[in-house]
């Protein structure tokens, strides 16, 4: 598929680029997308939750009343989970939520995410640019020129560009990544993808392996 190349002022440069159909025009595999997003979100969880169980609650282990003749249920220590201040039954324990996902599935998921954005016409290709110094105002001007000022956007760079990254860091709705840092979640989380020309080769190379 062909896409027009814009400059940072939102104007057409008169050039077009050919996006690979094997990356941007496949039939999306929703299950692969689901698995990859699930893995990404699972990896964000710290898993440090912990509830004290019966053996870990502070308190005496003395039997609090005699076994029979009280008219109520038998009871051992005050750490019984049925009592206030007692331990938690089957409470959460520290654990890792991560799970393995094959590389082929992850690549398919990213291709599917790109194809979904292409079908929705939410991909913009912009010629490579940089800033002389970090400047949030300059980045906001780029967003305005591209009509993305009030939309969640993801800028994909070919190589690390510290000035562009720092210029966007204060903006919650904008994210800047290199082609090697892309994830299915990041692609789908943005309303619009802004692909710099220099990133296209890296994207297609990473997803054609």
Image (cartoon, grey):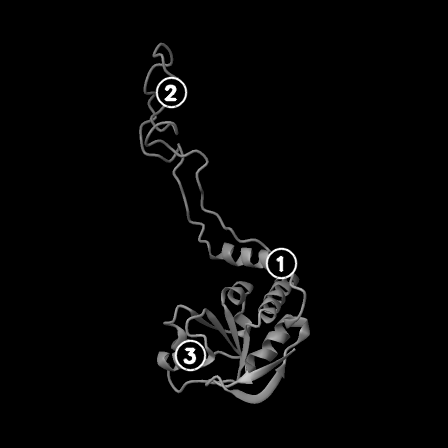
10, 156: nearer the viewer: 10
- Residue named by callout 1: 30
Q: Is residue 51 above or below residue 59?
A: below
Q: Is residue 120 above or below residue 202?
A: above
175, 125: nearer the viewer: 125
Residue 5, position as x, y percentages in the image: 56, 84
Determine the CA span between mark 2 and mark 1.
Answer: 53 Å
Residue 174, position as x, y percentages in the image: 43, 71
Pointers 3 and 1 in contact (CB under 8 A)?
no
Depth-wise, is mark 3 or mark 2 nearer the camera? 3
8, 99: nearer the viewer: 8
Residue 49, position as x, y percentages in the image: 41, 46
- Residue named by callout 2: 75
Image quadrant where one finds the C terminus: bottom right
Depth-wise, is mark 2 or mark 1 nearer the camera? 1
Classify mark 2: helix, strand or loop. loop
Earlier residue among tags 2 and 1: 1
Image quadrant where one finds the N terminus: bottom right
Determine the CA span between mark 3 and mark 1.
Answer: 32 Å
| Corner quadrant of residue 61 | top left
- Residue named by callout 3: 144
Classify mark 1: helix, strand or loop. helix
Earlier residue among tags 3 and 1: 1
The answer to whether residue 103 is seen in the rendering is yes
| Corner quadrant of residue 170 | bottom left
Q: Is residue 78 above or below residue 32?
A: above
Earlier residue among tags 3 and 2: 2
Q: Is residue 97 left or right of residue 116?
A: left
């Amino acid at each position: 598929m062909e896409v027009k190349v814009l400059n940072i002022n939102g104007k057409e440069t008169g050039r077009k680029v050919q996006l690979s159909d094997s990356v941007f025009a496949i039939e999306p595999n929703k299950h692969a997308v689901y698995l990859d997003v699930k893995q990404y979100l699972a990896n964000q969880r710290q898993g440090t939750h912990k509830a004290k169980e019966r053996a870990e609650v502070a308190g005496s282990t003395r039997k609090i009343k005699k076994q029979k003749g009280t008219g109520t249920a038998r009871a051992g220590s005050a750490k019984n989970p049925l009592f206030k201040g007692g331990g938690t039954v089957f409470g959460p324990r520290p654990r890792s939520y991560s799970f393995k996902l094959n590389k082929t599935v992850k690549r398919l998921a990213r291709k599917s995410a790109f194809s979904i954005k292409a079908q929705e016409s939410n991909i913009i290709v912009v010629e490579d640019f940089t800033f002389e110094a970090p400047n949030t105002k300059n980045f906001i001007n780029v967003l305005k020129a591209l009509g993305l000022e009030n939309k969640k956007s993801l800028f994909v760079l070919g190589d690390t560009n510290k000035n562009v990254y720092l210029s966007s860091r204060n903006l919650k709705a904008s994210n800047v990544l290199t082609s090697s840092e892309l994830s299915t979640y990041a692609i789908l989380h943005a309303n619009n993808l802004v692909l710099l020309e220099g990133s296209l080769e890296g994207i297609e190379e990473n997803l054609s392996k």
